[in-house]
Amino acid sequence: MNRTENGTPEMQKEQVYLLRLYIAAGEQNSKLARDNLDRICQEYLNGRCNIEEVDVLTDFESALADRVFVTPTLILVTPEPRVTVIGNLGDKERVMLALRLGGKYGS
């Protein structure tokens, strides 16, 4: 297996990310989180990203199953390990570190 400069497997660059974004529809921070996530996915994941958006106002059972009590909340489902980021995802550096993406952040 080829490795990149930072030691991560080359295959990680090909991996598809499954992200689950819990929102409260119509809420400003939820809209902002979706916009910020879209920008990050376009810039760093280039079509290697599937986003499941869950509105806690209509599907609270899924939120409870994932132990989500605050919106917006982003869960990196795959690749593992699973990671949770709470907030509007405006702190790009924090989100990039959590998702293990880009330059000094990982892949």
Image (tube, rainbow, N blue to C red):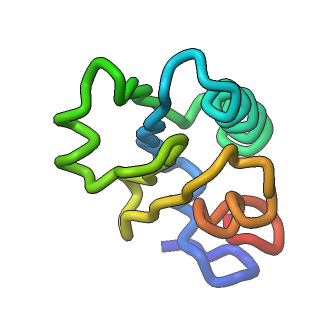
Front-lying residue, 100 or 57: 57
Quick one: quadrant of the C terminus?
A: bottom right
Q: Determine whether, in the image, residue 93 is placed left or right of residue 61.
A: right
Front-lying residue, 58 or 4: 58
Spot the residue most to the bottom.
7
Q: Is residue 42 visible?
A: no
The residue that appears at 25% across and 25% down in the rendered structure is: 59
Q: Is residue 70 visible?
A: yes
Q: Residue 95: which quarter of the image?
A: bottom right
Front-lying residue, 78 or 91: 91
The residue that appears at 38% across and 53% down in the rendered structure is: 78
* Residue 10 x/y as whole percent: 58, 64
* Residue 102 x/y as whole percent: 76, 60
The residue that appears at 82% across and 66% down in the rendered structure is: 103
* Residue 82 x/y as whole percent: 37, 64
Q: Residue 2: which quarter of the image?
A: bottom right
The residue that appears at 69% across and 74% down in the rendered structure is: 4
Q: Determine whether, in the image, residue 66 is placed left or right of residue 1.
A: left
**Residue 104 versus residue 92 in the image, above or below:** below
* Residue 80 x/y as whole percent: 36, 65
Front-lying residue, 70 or 80: 70
**Total labels drawn:** 0
**Residue 101 versus residue 77 in the image, above or below:** below
**Residue 82 versus residue 25 in the image, above or below:** below
Q: Residue 36: which quarter of the image?
A: top right
Q: Determine whether, in the image, residue 64 is placed left or right of residue 12.
A: left
